[in-house]
Image (cartoon, rainbow, N blue to C red):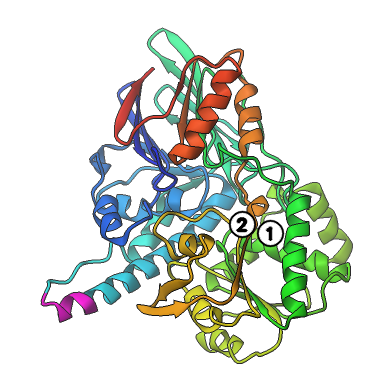
Amino acid sequence: MRIHFHGAARTVTGSMHLIEVNGSRLLLECGLFQGRRKDTYERNRNFPFDPRTIDAVILSHAHIDHSGNLPHLVKQGYNGPIYATHATAHLAALMLRDSGHIQEADATFLNRKRARRGEPPVEPLYTQEDSEKVAEYLRPIPYDRSFEAVKGVTATLMDAGHILGSAGIVLDIEERDRKFRLWFSGDIGRRDLPLLRDPVLPFDADYLLMESTYGDKSHHSPEAAFEELRTVVKRTIKRGGKIIIPAFAVGRTQELVVCLHRMTEEGDIPPVPIYVDSPLAINASQIFNEHPECMDAETRAYVLEHGHPILNFRQVIYTRSVDESKAINDYKKPAVIISASGMAEVGRILHHLRNNIEDPRNTILIVGWQAPHTLGRRLADRETRVKIFGETFTRKAEVETIGGLSAHAGQQMLVEYAMAVKDQVRKVFLVHGEDRGALALKEQLEQRGFENVFYPELHTTAEI
């Protein structure tokens, strides 16, 4: 058996791992690579394999860096099953349509610039129509139910506790005269996060392929992160400002809404408007409400007691239309604005940043990992002059970062995850991590007696 590391290798985006076994080719994930615009188009456009030769795809969850290149895969000839949990299939169909819209809009924007320079136009990586074709290949599978993915490979999806529907992928493999288990973590969640159940730790794994995003640091507890968030929100409201939060539409937005709901109910903050300004986040929140099988016991109990979804309450305002979004900028009193994208590269968040970045009363709140070269990373690094829509702004707004709200496991949890199979696992492969995270985690594991921990480079192959 061979594992080809074709994405999220020595970086945190574009997850894609190709397994060759028993004459079949199984693809784990098909994510978009995100980074410098000039690099991403060609990298996402050119697969390092022929999509027509892939027999099956298994998706750990719906985030675009794990699912976002599926439309292009299908466009290039893939026509096999795409296995995922029910919630992931539901979310992926939604998110890929949105991604198709973004691809088209980006191409239109670039082509205007190229036309002025006399350069030929570029085609979008894929369109909304391409995205919609993915739905016919999605095969929803319940958690904990085994199925044959390809010949000799039985797969099971285990709750990863990262976002709604997220899963670790367990592959029980028979090859020639041997049997072994490969456990792919997907993105590992954390204990005690709002809404979701805790991640299932691996067991009986001979080989472990795991993420290492935050391998260099442990997060504050969710409760400590809640306290940080409350402090920032209270301070900003007190000085008459707005809290502008770039947030991923799926996962982080819903977690923030639950935290702000709690603050309001407990009287920690006055009942200021909480705007969720992202059609994708609004639709995703509706999908959350439709999948109670993924929610923790506390959330299910709340819904039973109150008779309405936890994501719907008086102060939260979901804005779908462009006019509703623009009207937020006319509101001059304190408010919270949660908008996509999470790395502040595209979407409505750019308009809110442009309109609020030069007001010292306001706070820009960074609540997740920011890829290099993105506007989100420049804000997290507290640069004082940044470009938005090609115009330079002087940042006067306060910038705060809260890492403890991350849906990714921190170093302590990652070590615990690997330690769960220490006595059996033969090799550990660290993916979905930059050098500082992965190498720190590798060192931590080796100090605990792991002998074969690898940090593979892009497009390299491991033979098992």
Q: What residue did someone put label 1 on?
A: 255
114 magenta-colored = yes
The residue depicted at 75 percent of the width and 72 percent of the height is 235
- From the viewer's perspective, is 124 left or right of 395? left
* Residue 72 picture location, percent across and down: 31, 54
Q: Which amino acid does label 2 sit on?
A: Gly
Q: What stretch is highlighted in magenta?
A: 112-118
Total numbered circles: 2
Disc 1 to disc 2: CB gap under 8 Å: yes
The mark found on residue 251 in the picture is 2
* Residue 391 picture location, percent across and down: 38, 80
By secondary structure, the bulk of the magenta-drawn segment is best described as helix
Q: Which amino acid does label 1 sit on?
A: Glu
The residue depicted at 44 percent of the width and 65 percent of the height is 375
Considering the numbered disc 1 on the image, is that residue within a helix, a strand or a loop? helix
Task: Give residue 135's quadrant in the image.
Answer: bottom left
